[in-house]
Image (cartoon, helix red, strand yellow):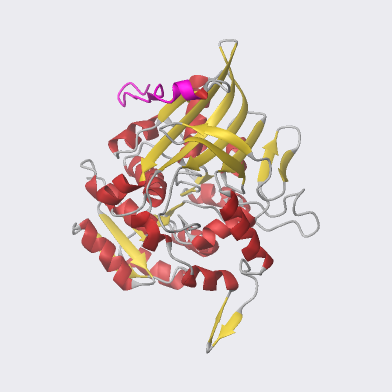
Amino acid sequence: MNILVIGCGGVGQSVAMLIQRNPNNRWLTRMVMADYDIARAEEVVKGAGDPRFIAETVDAGSSESITALIQKYEIEFVLNVVAPHFNEVIFDTCYENGVGYMDCAMTLSKRHPEKPYEQTHVKLGDYQFERDDAWEKKGILALVGSGVEPGLSDVFAKYAEKHLFDEIDEINVRDGDNYVVPGKGVSFGFSIWTTIEECLNPPVIWEKEKGWFTTESFSEPEEFFFPGGIGRVEVVNVEHEEVLLIPRYINCKRVTFKYGISKEFRTMLKNLEALGMDKTDKKVRLGSSEITPRDFLSIVAPSPLETAHLMVGKGCAGTWITGSKDGLPRSVYVYQIADNQECLLKYGTSSVVAQTAVGPAVMLDLIANGIWTGAGVHGPEFFDPDPVLVKMKEYGFPAAIHEKDSEYDEQYQRDSIFIEMNPEAGD
């Protein structure tokens, strides 16, 4: 398969490293690593050390620039790992050229003009799902939300529905960590632009009786126990794609997403919002150029790439499912843990971006090998989850199951069961 990767930041670099280092990567014919900064693309390609990897320049906001690369290299699938405000252009360009599309974050939402903390307006991914029929009729696939969250978290929900439950009450994605950056009280561990977007937008919740609705930023704080030595972390509601994806495919009663954000970090984000530094709908002139406040902040604030090598600790991404099996109540957390210093040694990137890159690396592998097939616009829940669990271990990021007990969580800290799948038997 000929693949075009648009964006050579941490996630793009990690995808390249994960695929190149997998001994079963014969399915890859060519991977074009494209970025607006050719030096960055060349750096990633040099690190891969494989003639199948090629560096190119691309303007992610230009359909003409993307089309030129698709045609030059006979691209079959495009992986979009740039900031989500480029999604519509890349998504539409793939459709026009009749090639497959994949992203880690879906097209952006817009707040309700009158009741932003009660009602949805334009939801994450609406732009893409509205075009599902057109993609299906053209016979091409757009796989949206393919990272770790969304992405693997959605696969975990589908796996639980298939293997672990007869009936599901709630599907609650929970992300927490014990990361520390020595000498830095508050720092960004992921894209500054995207962090501000998802943390300050009104969070979305889905309930079977009400459908999708919004709530206040950082609402409903709760303590959640994370395995692997992380322990209890306070998590809060944040806008995220899983809440928009899971109810489309899985029968349940409620879906939420909560993220472990420290009180200090929340305060910092709210202060940025109060100062207007989160804005993207107005531009400020600086010399001969114009730039939005959020873009300016993304430039001047310490980059996650700069602090990644300092960060110590582990991050846990997973999905907490409650319901019943064989007439008995069940509560299960299906998850994946990544250690930052280990990821730096293996891939040269932080665990945050390496963990995000596992989803697209695995899913491109499955599509290229004809294991995942289909047409239209779909989230990962559309497909069989079992091959993903097989491949996650192959790529060095195995998933595990933690049987939860609200009163005695700690006793299970060493009792999580790593998921072992037989790829031939499919179980």
User: Compared with residue 2, is residue 317 higher up or lower down, i.e. above or below?
Assistant: above
Which quadrant would residue 108 be assigned to in this image? bottom right
Q: Residue at x 32, y 68 (%)?
A: 40
State whether residue 226 is above or below residue 58.
above
Question: Which residue is at the front of the view, 327 or 132?
Answer: 327
Residue 17 in view in this figure: yes
Instruction: Using the rendered view, name the quadrant where residue 248 is placed.
Output: top right
Instruction: Give the answer, above or below, for where 73 lies relative to 388.
Output: below
Residue appearing at x 50%, y 41% in the figure = 176
Q: Residue at x 72, y 54 (%)?
A: 121
Tell me where residue 199 appears, x and y as whole percent.
60, 53
Residue 355 image point, x, y percent: 39, 45
Residue 81 forms part of the magenta stretch: no
In this view, which residue lies farthest toward the top?
327
Relative to residue 1, is residue 247 drawn left or right?
A: right
| Quadrant that contains the C terminus | top left
**Residue 131, how many percent across, how many down?**
59, 52
Residue at 67 percent across and 45 percent down: it is 204
Q: What residue span does the magenta drawing correspond to? A: 410-427
Q: Main secondary structure of the magenta part?
A: loop
Position in image of residue 183 (x %, y %): 42, 58
What is the count of numbered marks? 0
Q: Residue furthest front?
A: 183
Q: Residue furthest right?
A: 114
**Residue 38 appears left or right of 265:** left
Of 281 and 246, nearer the camera is 281
* Residue 421 magenta-highlighted: yes
Asked whether residue 76 appears in the rendered view, the answer is: no
Task: Tell me if residue 87 comes above or below residue 22 in the rendering.
Answer: below
